[in-house]
Image (cartoon, helix red, strand yellow):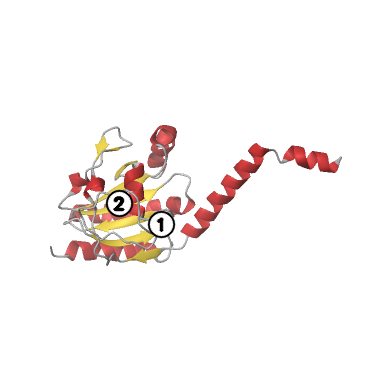
């Protein structure tokens, strides 16, 4: 009798959602540690491939297919990263279900308030489906008082920027000339905020 009850409980649907939950937990745990990556590889800025060659590759500049991609903003209008050319830009890949992203967002809001007057812009791009997560993302923006531009990354944009590293959050510090100065994978409450602040200072001080 006990064996029959066990088989009834572990239906294929329950097994599937248990697997999905375990994967989500593993992603959140792995993202709690922040990794700072300094792009050094001579990746061509004219590459338009959306598929990463390998997990170790690092973009040194924002490719045209990412710069020119039209993405949906939570406010309703389009987002193009090319609209921020000539400014220091922080691009953050995140999702509403991501625990480390929730911890990081208040720090990004603080940094935006601190650096906006100096010409720094921020764009938060959710990796979620824009149709399925529209209300969730807008509610998140209101709850966290996010005052920078928020929208959804297209699959091509997300894959190109991630280069095989799928953990979120990921933040990219981009200079006025479109060079990716620093890339941060994951979030540490202790180390990430000061590292982001220093990277923004370095980007502001960078010459062409």
In the image, 85 versus 111, the foreground residue is 85
Give the labeled residue for mark 1.
165
Label 2 crowd (10 A; few <14 / some 14-19 / many >=20): many
Q: Residue at x 26, y 38 (%)?
A: 70
Is the residue under label 2 in contact with that under label 1 (CB below 8 Å)?
no
Tag 2's secondary structure? strand
Q: Residue at x 31, y 61 (%)?
A: 58
CA gap between label 1 and label 2 equals 16 Å
Residue 162 is left or right of residue 41, and the answer is right
Q: Residue at x 46, y 58 (%)?
A: 31
Give the image quarter of residue 4: top right
Residue 176 is left or right of residue 105, and the answer is left
Where residue 53 sits: x, y (%)? 35, 56
Where residue 186 sits: x, y (%)? 42, 58
Label 1 crowd (10 A; few <14 / some 14-19 / many >=20): some
**Disc 1 or disc 2, which is closer to the eye?**
1
User: The N terminus lies in which quarter of the figure?
Assistant: top right
Give the labeled residue for mark 2.
91
């Amino acid at each position: 009798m006990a064996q029959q009850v066990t088989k009834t409980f572990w239906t294929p649907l329950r097994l599937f959602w248990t697997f999905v939950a375990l994967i989500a937990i593993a992603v959140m745990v792995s993202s709690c540690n922040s990794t700072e990556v300094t792009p050094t590889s001579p990746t061509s800025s004219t590459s338009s491939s959306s598929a990463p060659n390998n997990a170790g590759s690092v973009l040194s500049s924002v490719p045209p297919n990412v710069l020119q991609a039209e993405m949906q903003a939570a406010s309703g209008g389009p987002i193009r990263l090319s609209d921020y050319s000539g400014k220091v830009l922080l691009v953050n890949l995140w999702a509403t279900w991501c625990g480390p992203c929730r911890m990081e967002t208040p720090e990004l809001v603080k940094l935006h308030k601190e650096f906006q007057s100096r010409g720094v812009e921020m764009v938060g791009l959710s990796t979620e489906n824009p149709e399925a997560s529209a209300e969730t993302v807008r509610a998140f923006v209101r709850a966290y008082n996010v005052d920078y531009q928020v929208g959804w990354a297209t699959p091509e944009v997300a894959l190109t920027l991630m280069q095989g590293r799928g953990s979120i959050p990921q933040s990219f510090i981009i200079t006025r000339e479109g060079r990716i100065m620093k890339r941060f994978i994951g979030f540490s409450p202790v180390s990430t905020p000061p590292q982001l602040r220093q990277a923004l200072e370095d980007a502001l001080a960078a010459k062409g």
